[in-house]
Image (spheres, helix red, strand yellow):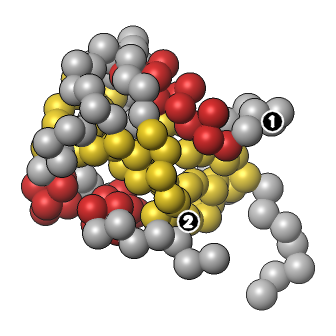
Amino acid sequence: MSDEHLQATISQKAALFGPDGDLLLLSRAATAGWELPGGRIGTTEDVVPGLRREVREETGLDVAVEEPVYTDAWSTEDGEGRYAVVYRCSTDDCAVSPSDEHDDWRWVAPDVAVEDVLSTPRLRTAVERAAERRAVVR
């Protein structure tokens, strides 16, 4: 264990399930991959309202934020610290209005997202945990 504290950008993501149990994925042309909605929280912003704000900005959807299902810390290739928390979220609406940040979106079955769509182990694990409603151990 290091005595050095992690200096990191904190982001929150939503494993967002719609009324039929499908998962919402967003595509960003710059990254050429699919991701979960969400983003960085402000320094004075509360966690749950911050995640709701990010999801609303990116999708136009209002969501219920449930339990955190995944956390991870890592460093980028440039040595920048990252810390992410993924929450299980739900919505009764499936009419997505994506922001300019994203060029595509789709609702998919969680198992399809894990097996065929998501490219990073972090996202696959987060979605598996969210689908199983396995909260982060506190």
In this rendered view, identify the residue nearer to me: 65 or 24.
65
- Callout 2 environment at 10 Å: few (<14), some (14 to 19), or many (20+)? few
On the image, the x and y values in percent for residue 115 come to 13, 62
Residue positioned most to the bottom: 1
Q: What's the residue at 77%, 87% (across, down)?
A: 1
Q: Is residue 3 above or below residue 35?
A: below
Mark 1 vs mark 2, CA separation in Å: 19 Å
Q: What's the residue at 56%, 26% (across, down)?
A: 53
Residue positioned most to the right: 3
Identified by mark 1, the residue type is Thr
Q: What's the residue at 27%, 62% (across, down)?
A: 131
In this rendered view, identify the residue nearer to me: 49 or 92.
92
- Callout 1 environment at 10 Å: few (<14), some (14 to 19), or many (20+)? few
Q: Name the residue under label 1.
A: 43
* 127 lies left or right of 2: left
Q: In this view, does 90 lie above or below 109?
A: above
Asked which quadrant contains residue 31, the reply is top left
Q: Mark 2 points at which residue?
A: 72
Q: Is residue 30 above or below residue 35?
A: above
On the image, the x and y values in percent for residue 110 come to 18, 55
- Evaluate whether residue 125 shows in this view: no
Q: What's the residue at 56%, 37% (across, down)?
A: 51
